Amino acid sequence: MKVLVLNGPNLGRLDLRDSNIYGNLDFDGLKSEIVSAGKELGFVCDVRQSDSEVEIISWLHEAADTSTPVVFNPAAFTHYSYAIRDAADMVKAPVIEVHLSNPMSREEFRHTSVITGVANGTIAGFGPDSYRLALLALSRMAN
Ligand code: DQA
């Protein structure tokens, strides 16, 4: 089964972000961890990243139109993009929200997620394993 793994702004530059928060993997490293974790569970992961709200919305429309499950790290859009929330709400296949860090233990503006209410679940704070755990949850939901 195909899974769209969508990543929001600045995640393409993980190697330049605070390694105490985001770890030492660059985005290509994260991508290969996700692809191999997916493969172990029988998924083909299509891992994408964009800094553009418009592009992320178009990918969510694609997921809605093709009933494709989504593992979704909306990055900073998590905290304020109602347009992305509305697009995610149209996806009837499962949507799992993920974060590398634990936003609840960080600055107050990160304590709000406008995505959580339209996601099937949220996994945060486990670095790349947040994605692995989300894929595991998806495989349990599919069986
Ligand atoms: C993030 C957390 C967000 O608050 C932040 O804006 C990000 C990354 C995470 O994966 O921990 O860019 O989504």
Image (spheres, rainbow, N blue to C red):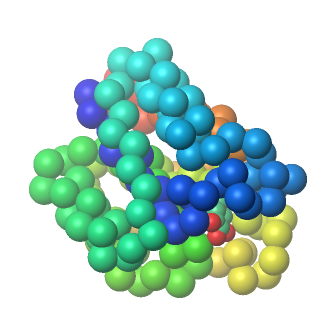
- Looking at the picture, does residue 74 appear above or below residue 124? below
Looking at the image, which residue is at 76% across and 42% down?
A: 24
Does residue 84 appear in the picture of this structure? yes
The quadrant of the image that shows the C terminus is top left
Q: Quadrant of the N terminus?
A: top left
For residue 30, which quarter of the picture? top right
Q: For the point 41% across and 19% down, which residue is it?
A: 39
Closer to the camera in the image, 33 or 120: 33
Where does residue 76 sit, x and y in percent of width and height?
Answer: 58, 73
In this rendered view, identify the residue nearer to me: 77 or 116: 77
Q: What residue is shown at x 56% (from left), y 29% (from top)? A: 33
Quadrant location, ligand no. 1:
bottom right
Question: Residue 48: where, in percent of width, then height?
Answer: 39, 50
Give coordinates of residue 140: x percent, y percent.
Answer: 44, 27
Q: Who's the residue at 19% across and 57% down the image? A: 62
- The image position of residue 80, as x and y in percent, is 53, 84
Query: In this rendering, does residue 130 appear at all?
Result: no
